[in-house]
Amino acid sequence: MTPRIVPKAKSGSHISPQASYKVAVLGAAGGIGQPLGLLIKMSPLVSELHLYDITNVKGVAADLSHCNTPAQVLDFTGPSELANCLKGVDVVVIPAGVPRKPGMTRDDFFNINASIVKTLVEAVADNCPEAFIHIISNPVNSTVPIAAEVLKRKGVYNPKKLFGVTTLDVVRANTFVAQKKNLKLIDVDVPVVGGHAGITILPLLSKTRPSVTFTDDEIEELTKRIQNAGTEVVEAKAGAGSATLSMAYAAARFVESSLHALAGDPDVYECTFIQSELTDLPFFASRVKLGKNGVESVVSADLEGVTEYEAKALEALKAELKGSIEKGITFANKDQEAAASV
Ligand SMILES: NC(=O)C1=CN([C@@H]2O[C@H](COP(=O)(O)OP(=O)(O)OC[C@H]3O[C@@H](n4cnc5c(N)ncnc54)[C@H](O)[C@@H]3O)[C@@H](O)[C@H]2O)C=CC1
Ligand SMILES: O=C([O-])CC(=O)C(=O)O
């Protein structure tokens, strides 16, 4: 029997034992890509794991292929092999890009990661336009709007299938709340909304399940810790990159949830950064119900009846998140504008 390493979040339903899918990881030789490849290789729902990078991916694939789990591992190196990597794929996960070092923000490598995501999503649009697209590369608040613009320009944009991966914020919130309140980790679920950078990360502690009461000091401390958790790891790694192992765990959970949704599980919920009408911002992270066609519905109840602290934090994050979204959209369209002005 294939062991289940990464539990899908909160679902009690069963799915067909025949379900099997092809998953591609772009940036598969990196700090996130390698452990993510390993976790996806463990999934009984995966028939083929396609690993793509511009460097060193052959060794990663050879190594992973020796694990005696069903998924077949295929490697693809460099732009000439990207199309083949993507053909027929059901889920594409993109952790390609540069991670930050101490003293940097997620926006400090905007240009390089924006270009990488744009190029990769163009290839996704050409080769597997129906796939679920999971964007991990930072700054997520901008790279997801860039991906949306690229897909629109290619005429294949389906907002229900484009996801910014914010699962790590939920994983961290669950861990920190369970530790602080001495709860059984497996039971704790905190929705985290907004975006994925600093104050745009907003844990809705009042919506924690099971219901918990927090003092004002606990709310302040937990909120700040969840918002700064990425920086906590960057500083601890002291120049050797950002979160990779916890990120791989979180991304594998989001992949597993997506595969369960594709397989017809009717009870799959995750927080993710998507095109959204929940607030006046065009993109916003919130809990959504996932189905065969991607986002089936947005859990609007999470934003109803929030505390005064959360309502203020929600207003406070809007300007920064709006700016990051607009920056992404401007970047994605600037070559077109340049072409039009010639
Ligand atoms: N969404 C989230 O919660 C998180 C996002 N991240 C982000 O994930 C990204 C990757 O982080 P790490 O894996 O630690 O970085 P890394 O530098 O260890 O790995 C990145 C990989 O991407 C590859 N790559 C670069 N350009 C590429 C291209 N054009 N096509 C394919 N592959 C390409 C590199 O060769 C490398 O193997 C960073 O932008 C980081 O900020 C990191 C942690 C959490
Ligand atoms: O902090 C970073 O640069 C990486 C990241 O997004 C996270 O760990 O949440």
Image (spheres, helix red, strand yellow):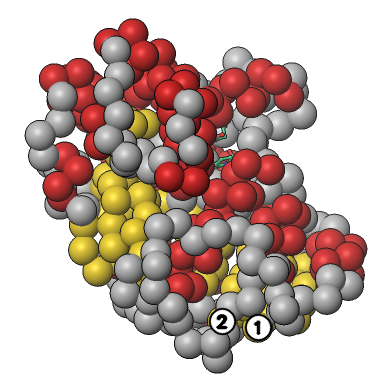
Q: Are marks 2 and 1 in contact (CB under 8 Å)?
A: yes
Position of 301 with respect to 206 (left or right) is left
Q: Report the front residue among 112 and 140.
A: 140
Q: How many marks?
A: 2
Which quadrant is the N terminus positioned in?
A: bottom right
**Residue type at numbered disc 2:** Tyr
Query: Residue 159 falls in which quadrant of the image?
Result: bottom left
| Figure quadrant of the C terminus | bottom left
Disc 1 on helix, strand or loop?
A: strand
Numbered circle sitting on residue 21: 2
The outermost residue toward the left is 305
As helix, strand or loop, the secondary structure at mark 2 comes to strand
- Dividing the picture into quarters, in which one does residue 291 lie? bottom left
User: Which of the two labelled residues, at mark 2 and mark 1, occupies the earlier sequence position?
Assistant: 2
Residue drawn 67% across the image and 41% down it: 244
Q: Where residue 89 sits in the image (x, y, percent)?
A: 56, 80
Q: Is residue 309 above or below residue 190?
A: above
- Would you name the residue on which mark 1 appears? 47
Type of the residue with mark 1:
Ser
